[in-house]
Image: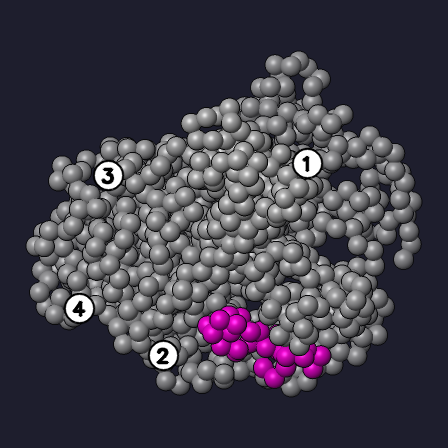
Amino acid sequence: MEIRKKYFADERNDDLKEIGQSRQRSDALGHVKGITPFYADRAIPGLLHIRMVRSPHHHARILGIDASRAERHPGVRRVITARDVPHNVYTVLSLINIGPEDEPVLAFDKVRWQGEPIVCIVADSERAAYEAAQLVQIAYEELPAVFDVEEALKPGAPLVNEYHGQNYYRYDSGESRKVILGDVEKGFAEADFILEQRYQASPIEQAPTETTGCVVVPDQNNRFTCYTGTQAVFFTLDNSSVILQVPGQQLHFVGGTAGGGFGGKVDCTTEPIAILASMLTGRPVSYIYNRYEEMQISSPRAAERIYLKDGVMKDGRIVARQVRCYVDSGAYSRHTPYGTQKAAAHFPGPYTIPNVRIDCYCVYTNRTPSSAMRGFGVTIGDFALEVQMDKLARLIGMDPLEFRFVNAYRDGDMKAHHQPTEGAALIECMQEAAEWADWPVDPRCMAMSSREPRRQP
Amino acid sequence: MTRKRGRGVAAVNYPTGMNLGGDPTQALVHSTPTGNFMVTVSSVDLGQGMKQILRQICAETLGVPSERVVVDTADSDTGPHCMGTFASRGTHRAGNAVIAAAREARGVMLEVAAEMLEVSTDDLETDGAGNIHVVGAPAKAVSVTDTALAAHFQKGRSISGRGMFLVPRSYPSPVDGAMKPATCYAHACTVAEVEVDVETGEVDVISLKNVYEIGRALNPRMVEQQLVGGAWMGISHAIYETTEPYYPQRDHRGVDFNEYLMPGPGNLPRTEVVVLERPAPDGPYGGKGPGEMCANAPIPAIANAIFDAVGVRIDTMPFTPEKILRALRGLEA
Amino acid sequence: MAKIPLHFILNGEERAEFVDSGATLLRLLRDKTGDLTAKSGCLQGTCGTCTVLVDGAPRLSCITLAEDCDGADVETVAGLAAHGQLHPLQHAVMEHFAAQCGFCTPGMLMAAKALFLTNPRPSREDVVEALSGNICRCTGYEPIIQAVLSAAQVMSASGPGAA
Ligand code: FES
Ligand code: FES
């Protein structure tokens, strides 16, 4: 890796003693000795193990649960159902007023995705827990399911989550988070060319090598210590405290060292139930996702479908961009209404476009609830935007990199969400790339600067 | 010739910190009697190396060597609140909180040293090697250790500080979406070179040239770790990964590492990284969050390179051999 | 459940434990011996985080039966650093910044050590082959490959038998 100091040198003080130095990581020695303490790396005598009984159906009414055989199975200490959970709703970001309380910790009346947890088995060994989980009998009435974000929005589509009353999250701006700048229709009317395209991405799993989970140990003074790989210690502690209806001071969270996260460990799904199991049994309890659960049960990056419509001039200027983005939240919200809003703030990309209309929809379907992942709300949008840029350039017969220079945002340019651009550096990144990759562009592009105001056409 | 080469470009930006702000982080810093410094936070290190970065940030601000700083993180009994490690916020938010705490601690340290040297605090500077001395007179000095000892045992002072960083919450307008989603953005431009096998539809990424603008490379080797690993993840997203290959159909699913595909050590392109630094005015020493953004630009760059190579557009991620073959067949028809 | 008596050597020390029939070597190590260096990333033989050496050969301890290790010589990362000296592989991983979260690191180190035992001067292809059963989600592999290659160089420079 090289650092090219010639850019923005006047904005930097390069004369620092610690900053900018490639010091060895403080955790490197622990890593190579294998002694970095991950949440499962504690020898705890008498540890109990959790296995979840999960829905085999995408959408079904629960008619009855019979766990009596599981309860009698040797080694089973406790069977937990929705009735045992004091406040049986995930509170996600309700602490800062984002996101609704639309998801039970354990399902009771309905299941809305394949894999939704219903019954929790707590047993002496993993084996006993697995065996007992097979013995739980649940009667279902299957319901029609919907898997496509646009199908889900059609009238008559099966209702995924009654909490919302419709298959989308209702923002204060209506069925979508809207961002509007200028007049997009006027822009299209002026444009030399118009291009409308559809993009899509499937869900993606964070797949950290360490799976999601935690180990809970009852402490003295009726406190519970939770060793966890969570990405957000207090967020998880506070949510657990609400779900369990116990004061926060009874909970002690120890974490800070995770075997990868990539956004997959912000959902607070294992901690509340493991703490509850520990409270109910008085024993230390571990709840660790197996690899199947990590892949199919833990929230993935949301699938998205994006429609981009652009109006472009022969000289390369994009004069209008319209975005319709459907984010597949799965059966519950988790962090997806937030991520969808982040997508709305990110479009139309790092380009200055006078007329913009953005509608981002957070849509409920009968699949695994999606949530955060590296690039949350942005990664898929960038894929769509940057492929579209390539197509537009070729449409008007311009070099794709030059086309981006023409439209690249600069300091002071008004963004679609009505904020002036600050600290832009896209032009310089492209100049460096052009030079380095030997991708010749017009000298005028190489003379541009993010700091120089754009000349009005 | 069944293998065709092509190259493509993509340019992106990425916001640092939780969208719309409202995501606080706190830090505490205190010295031990012998002048070592403890940073107490509740932020999480996912492997990105936050513990080390906070250590260097604290050391820089205090003016002591980083070996003398220990970062104690994520014990809810001792660490003050942090919203969490996500949204590229760790270094930015926690870094700023540590700077604030370390500044306050440095203030006390210099006051004690000033009393010991009988000068004014304004006349003092740190040498970054464990000493405090009078500006322009390096011989008139006291060590950080002696200063801490004096603070503890003679002056009755606590060399400590509290730091808090909060970007105030912005609320989008329901009418036109006017909002302030972030205070600073990182940038990237990737040029990807691929080879597509027109008989099998398989894509080999030959090289990635990535230019990343990240505000400030606080620790260059660690930045490189993030950027190289992130670029790898971008390739993986582009041509391999998904839990539902036939989305929105739900019937095929990757359930383990045999079925959920990622590139292994045997199929790596030449990945090169260049870093630019335009410091963020509100970033810790100018730093922005580079960890998420680095996976984003390679994906469309690869898509565009595939088009350049074989003339088909794959507008659905991931770009599997099946999709490419179907598109090539469509081209022939 | 019947308990099976087991004698084995762990990082040069003799051990005796009782294990359940069907228990894995990974469980034996983590639950009985207190050696927590082998990680459980999948428990199905697909990620390599649990790699240890059994009689000098790399084994996925999550799918190795403990009872099959009676009399065996088992090595984990805990035994890599001899007499307080880091193994050249450990040095190299640090120097090359080849660990981020560190969860895959113990398995990578043991897979590489196993390679050195049979092939002290591996090519890049040999290293890739030896690591191909080990998943890393953080680094993009290149730094790990570089670290293993450079450790091989250091070790062959310091003479045979250094592994
Ligand atoms: S835990 Fe053994 S291979 Fe994954
Ligand atoms: S360093 Fe995190 S999995 Fe390899």
The label shown at residue A33 is 1
Q: Name the residue beneath numbered marker 3.
A: A431
- Disc 3 residue type (three-letter): Gln
Quadrant assignment for the N terminus of chain A = top left
Vertical side of C159 occupied by B182: above or below: below
- Disc 2 residue type (three-letter): Asp
Of marks 1 and 4, which one's residue comes earlier in the chain?
A: 1
Report the magenta residues as a range: A83-110
- Disc 4 residue type (three-letter): Gly
| Displayed quadrant of residue B316 | bottom left
Q: Check disc 2 and report its element: helix, strand or loop.
A: loop
- Label 3 to label 2, Cα distance in Å? 41 Å
Report the label total: 4
The label shown at residue A172 is 2
Q: Please tell me how crowded label 1 is: few (under 14), some (14-19), or many (20+) other residues with Cα within 10 Å.
A: many
Determine the residue positioned at 81% across, 68% down.
Answer: A282
Q: Is residue B109 left or right of residue A374?
A: right
Determine the residue positioned at 78% across, 64% down.
Answer: A218
Of marks 1 and 2, which one's residue comes earlier in the chain?
A: 1
Q: Nearer the viewer, residue C1 or B129?
A: B129
> Horizontal and vertical percent for residue A188?
13, 66
Q: Is residue C85 left or right of residue B192?
A: right
The label shown at residue B200 is none
| Displayed quadrant of residue C64 | top right
Mark 4 Cβ inside 8 Å of ligand 2: no
> Horizontal and vertical percent for residue A15?
39, 32
Q: Are marks 1 and 3 in contact (CB under 8 Å)?
A: no
Chain under disc 1: A
Determine the residue positioned at 78% across, 51% down.
Answer: A43
Q: Please tell me how crowded label 4 is: few (under 14), some (14-19), or many (20+) other residues with Cα within 10 Å.
A: some
Determine the residue positioned at 19% across, 52% down.
Answer: A407
